[in-house]
Amino acid sequence: MSALLRAEARKTVTTRSFVLIAAAAVVYPALSLLPAVLAPEPPAVDGGTILEVLRGGADVLLVAALMLGILAAAGEYRHGTIVPTLLVDPRRERFVAVKLGAQAALGAVLALAVTAVGLVAGGSYLAGRDVSVDVLSSDVVATVAAVAVVTALYATIGAAVGALVKNQTGAVAGALIWVFTVENAVPIVLRDPGLKRWLPGGAADRLLHLADPSPGMTNPWIALGVLAGLAAVLAGAAVVAIKASDIR
């Protein structure tokens, strides 16, 4: 199993799409500070600003992880590599498990890279404004850990969606529509703002605010359960779908 995970990870990181998307996600935290650096009147900052930098990087990172998971799984069908992949190990439930496991691990590693850039860039910016940052404080550590966990879950969800839908373009388009339109529209259409906490974006937002939750936010364990439960349901559906499909 470990050999399959390593092989899957190598196959993913050598693709051009992974390199481009991952690179964009990694540099984003530094680029996001440019407006503040170039502003005639810099915005007010304090020790908590570093958490905002980390969460800002995570907003882009989660979409990137979702896309990379979809591309890794649905790309097998688009490029026809699903057949030789299953010839190596015909157990289709293992195919899904390896996809999800490898993407979760890569998502966590990518999250650590993005948060590292965010800490360096954000810390440097704040130091220039005479604001000290303790990168080992409990709030920073909790936020970094939350970014890694949420990114791993989003990458897992992406891989499950890709394995379930199979059509790469359709899966990517559907995921982007969900993230940028449906999640925001559902609470408005149903006139229940509280629904947001039960959707992936709301659950992710709660976990990213682990260190400084706003009043009325749900329990972080419930938020974690929402994301983990969604990943599990989609993974199960992907296993059922791939077992039922006639792949030749």
Image (cartoon, rainbow, N blue to C red):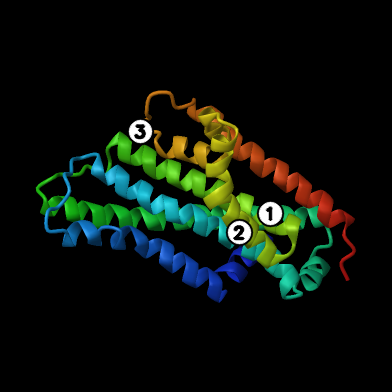
Q: Which residue is located at x 49 percent, y 52 percent?
A: 62
From the top left corner, tell me how far across and down residue 237 is, in percent.
77, 47
Residue ID for mark 1 = 161
Residue placed most toward the observer, 157 or 139: 157
Camera-side residue of 191 and 184: 191
What residue sits right under mark 2 in the picture? 69
Asked whether the viewer can see residue 91, the reply is: yes
Q: CA distance from mark 3 to mark 2?
A: 28 Å
Q: Are the residues tagged 1 and 3 within 8 Å (C-beta)?
A: no
Mark pair 1, 3: CA separation = 30 Å
Tag 1 or tag 2, which sits nearer the N-term? 2
Identity of the residue drawn at 44% across and 56% down? 60
Sequence-first disc among 3 and 2: 2
Residue for point 81% across, 66% down? 86
In the image, is residue 226 above or below residue 34?
Answer: above
For the residue marked with disc 1, what is the amino acid? Val
Label 1 Cα neighbours within 10 Å, binned few <14 / some 14-19 / many ≥20: many
| Place of residue 102 in the rendered image (x, y in percent of width and height, measured from the top left) | 61, 57
In the image as oriented, which residue stretches furthest toward the left? 130
Task: Check residue 128 in the rendering and tell me which mark sits there, or answer none.
Answer: none
- SS at badge 3: loop
Going by the image, does 37 lie left or right of 99?
A: left
Q: Quadrant of the C terminus?
A: bottom right
Residue identifier under label 3: 211
Task: Tell whether label 1 touches label 2 (CB within 8 Å).
Answer: yes
Residue at position x 72%, y 75% from top? 79
Circle 1 — which element? helix
Image-based side of 246 in relation to 68, left or right: right
Answer with the quarter of the image where residue 213 lies. top left
